Amino acid sequence: MSTLDPRVDIGHVHLKVADIERSLAFYSGVLGFEEQARYGDEAVFLSAGGYHHHIGLNTWESHGASAPPPGHTGLYHAAIRYPDRRALAGALRRLVDAGISLDGASDHGVSEALYLRDPDGNGLELYWDRPKEEWPQLDDGSLGMFTQPLDVRALLAEAE
């Protein structure tokens, strides 16, 4: 079996939500994504920079529904990659200003990440990747990812 073409990437995430307006207030109002297309009160498509959509939100099967209970299968989190540390710091500033708490914050060696939940309980990771040449390596040359606490105060200071 051949390996996957390295140009393949993940293009967008589409989430079932309970309330379009509530989710739009979070993804657009707090995170800053721009609305690209809307289908009444049932679906909205959002992006950064005018792309057709990075995030789709719909209530087709979930209007008024509750979040799935813990301990069940489903999406662990969707990850939103920021271009650099300063942009991630700006996202953190927006979260703090909106009173949204984090579930965690980690330095993985290859990246720095913030973890939180959207209004429907969907897990989100907001992160930036360090340049590949800075990624940690083990003695055998393989990737040496790790998880250590991220200094959130220092990150937030970069947004000032």
Image (cartoon, helix red, strand yellow):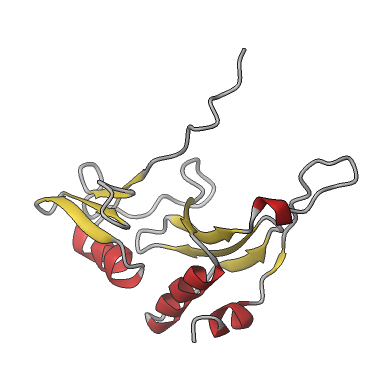
Report the side of 134 relative to 37 (left or right). right
Is residue 100 something that shows in the picture? no
Please state the horizontal and vertical placement of residue 143, each as a whole percent of the image.
76, 45
Report the side of 61 relative to 90 (left or right). left
22 and 106: which one is in front? 106
47 above or below 14? below
Q: Toward which corner of the image does residue 31 lie, by quadrant?
A: bottom left
106 and 76: which one is in front? 106
37 and 7: which one is in front? 7
Report the side of 62 relative to 90 (left or right). left
Please state the horizontal and vertical placement of residue 78, each as a whole percent of the image.
46, 50
Write the residue at 85% across / 47% down: 138
Q: Toward which corner of the image does residue 107 lie, by quadrant?
A: bottom right
Is residue 144 something that shows in the picture? yes
Please identify the residue farthest to the top as the structure is shown.
Answer: 1
Report the side of 41 relative to 33 (left or right). left
105 above or below 147? below
Which quadrant: the N terminus?
top right
Please identify the residue farthest to the left as the structure is shown.
Answer: 40
16 above or below 96? above
Please identify the residue farthest to the front as the structure is shown.
Answer: 133
How many numbered dots are placed on residues in this image? Answer: 0
118 and 84: which one is in front? 84
Write the residue at 22% across / 48% down: 59
Write the residue at 54% across / 47% down: 71
Please state the horizontal and vertical placement of residue 86, each as a whole percent of the image.
52, 73
85 above or below 59? below
Write the residue at 14% across / 51% down: 38
Please state the horizontal and vertical placement of residue 105, each as a whole percent of the image.
61, 68
